[in-house]
Amino acid sequence: MMRLRSQDLECWKCGMSLAAVTLPFRRLEPCPQCEAELHVCKMCRYYDSHVSDQCTEDQAEQVRNKERANFCDYFTPRAGAHTAGRTATSQASKQQLNDLFASSPEGSGSNRDEAGAARDALKDLFKSDR
Ligand SMILES: [Zn+2]
């Protein structure tokens, strides 16, 4: 079996190279860039979204949250975790992101300013009519 080096690994979430992180991961090891926890199913070689409970290791205890640090004894980081995880979920998360931006305070704030400016202009119009 080939020995895994951290420079072969990338964050499952943002794709950042994990060369700066020493192996093995501490349980709460964060990604240097996005601070996602790295000791998680999605970073593990046994993770497979196509099988039931998304783990191909039969002995491993079921981990419910695949994106939070787990206590799994079988955790083994795998190279290409980011690329491999970008399948059906990428579309869903993109939609979530769009929703987030649509409802963000910044977005509605600028809209409110525009609406407010329009209302003021309208008020001025009525004022001058009177
Ligand atoms: Zn990351």
Image: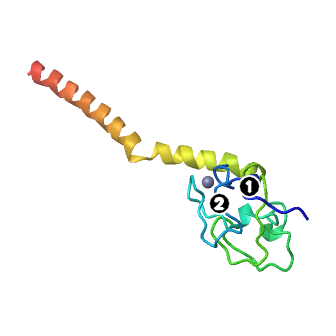
In what quadrant does ligand 1 lie? bottom right
Whether 93 is drawn above or below 109: the answer is: below
Q: Residues within 10 Å of mark 1 (few under 14, many from 20)?
A: many
Q: Position of residue 98 (x, y in %)?
A: 55, 43
> Label 1 vs label 2: CA separation?
9 Å
Whether 85 is drawn above or below 41: the answer is: above
The residue at the far top in this view is 129
Numbered tag placed on residue 9 in the rendering:
1
Which residue is located at x 61 percent, y 66 percent? 29
Numbered tag placed on residue 21 in the rendering:
2
Which of these two is toward me, 5 or 123? 5
Q: Residues within 10 Å of mark 2 (few under 14, many from 20)?
A: some
Q: Position of residue 62 (x, y in %)?
A: 75, 77
Whether 43 is drawn above or below 15: the answer is: below
Q: Secondary structure at mark 2?
A: loop
Which residue is located at x 91 percent, y 65 percent? 1
Q: Are marks 1 and 2 in contact (CB under 8 Å)?
A: yes
